Amino acid sequence: MTAVEGLLRELAPQVLGALVRRHGQFDRAEDATQEALLAAAVQWPVEGIPDNPRGWLVTVGSRRLLDEMRSEHARRRREERSAPTELPEVPETDDSLTLLFLCCHPDLSVPSQVALTLRAVGGLTTAQIAAAFLVPEATMAQRISRAKQTIRAKGLHGRTGDLDVVLHVLYLIFNEGYTTSTGDDLTVPHLSDEAIRLTRWLHRLVPEDPEVAGLLALMLLTDARRPARTAADGSLVPLAEQDRALWDRSLIAEGVALVTAALPRGRVGPYQLQAAIAAVHDEAAHVDATDWVQILGLYDLLARVAPGPMVALNRAVAVAQVRGPAPALALLHELSGEPRMARHHRFLATRAFLRELAGDNESAAADYRLAAKHATSLPERRHLTRKAAGLA
């Protein structure tokens, strides 16, 4: 990526946010922003980067937007005469946060929030987003178009969303990149990298928020293991079997520092606790050195702060490591009453692991086979099938 390309990617959401704030038309503002970015990509490498690149882009984008509006409404002629040739500079934080909150507005569906965030804030093309989620480009284009129509129809503007929604959207993007829900590959690094980049950006905008720091820490501590998660043939390598020498120690150090600084600030949320759990795993020199007692204590707290079936499922694994498989299997028996969990491949795989730990290889193999049947990721399906075959 050239210096100009990197600068344009950084400035794109700021420019779009400024145009949305000034003109209040998201879809048209995005088109105008793209035209301004294209003009800059052509002119700046030849003429040089202007002294105020953000102002240059905002001015060009605003002119393009006004040109379109004038063609539809004659009264825009008055705006043309009164429009300044250089828009006044505004704090980047205001526009950037406004745009991010708008893309994650609760009136939009979760898939639309994810797609619009990647498109408008992340700067990915519709084709890139479609490829990452393994859907046709036309389908993704329709999804993004519907999101823009919702914003236009409801007149959404301003910072009306919830920071928790923004964090959840970024968390979903990271998770889909780290372990894809469908397809032949275990990971889509482009997505998890983008989630980390956007969360770093958000952390710079609101450095005082402990949950933003917690989410960034969680992403870094998790992504640090990525080089060890797949074998040479692309097959999945579970955490207990990973070569920890391949883990990225710089990401681990950064993540540990972030969560260590965030936890004492007062409000302890689920992302900070998940990051703390990830830190305990990452700081263990080998799997047998893992402090499962501390991990169980953190899961106990997480179950109170953010109760849910997946938290309960992960807590059961910690219970098994500290107290043995029997009490952990009892916890899973309680979870099996929830229809969605009973057929979820992660629930079935966890039960298989616990049954294997308890010495019930026949039941464990049956669960591994059933988990493989319900898994939608091909690497996960193959891993579970191999586990079942190994117990036969």
Image (tube, rainbow, N blue to C red):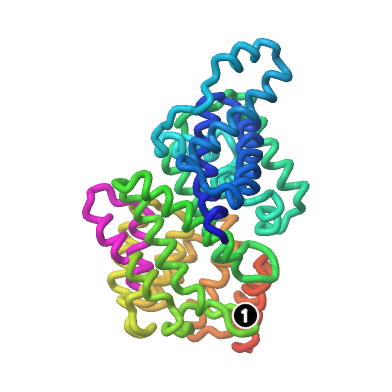
Give coordinates of residue 239: x percent, y percent: 47, 78
Residue 76 or residue 376, whichever sits in front: 76
Q: In this view of the protein, can residue 111 be seen by the observer?
A: no
Residue 141 or residue 1, whichever sits in front: 1
Give coordinates of residue 333: x percent, y percent: 49, 65
When the figure is inspected, residue 351 is found, relative to residue 158, above or below; the finding is below
Q: Which residue lies furthest to the front in this view?
A: 47
Give coordinates of residue 33: x percent, y percent: 60, 37
Name the quarter where the N terminus is drawn: bottom right
Within 10 angstroms of label 1, few (less than 14), some, or many (20 or more) residues?
A: some
Magenta segment: does it hold 267?
yes
The residue positioned 59% from the left and 68% from the top of the image is 187
Query: For mark 1, what is the residue?
Result: 235
The residue positioned 48% from the left and 56% from the top of the image is 197
The residue positioned 70% from the left and 37% from the top of the image is 145
Q: In this view of the protein, can residue 84 be seen by the observer?
A: yes
Left or right: 148 in relation to 318: right
Residue 181 or residue 98, whichever sits in front: 98
Name the quarter where the C terminus is drawn: bottom right
Q: Quadrant of residue 39?
A: top right
Q: Magenta part of the protein: which range? A: 256-280
Residue 46 or residue 84, whichever sits in front: 46
Magenta segment: does it hold 168?
no
The residue positioned 66% from the left and 53% from the top of the image is 129
Give coordinates of residue 233: x percent, y percent: 65, 84
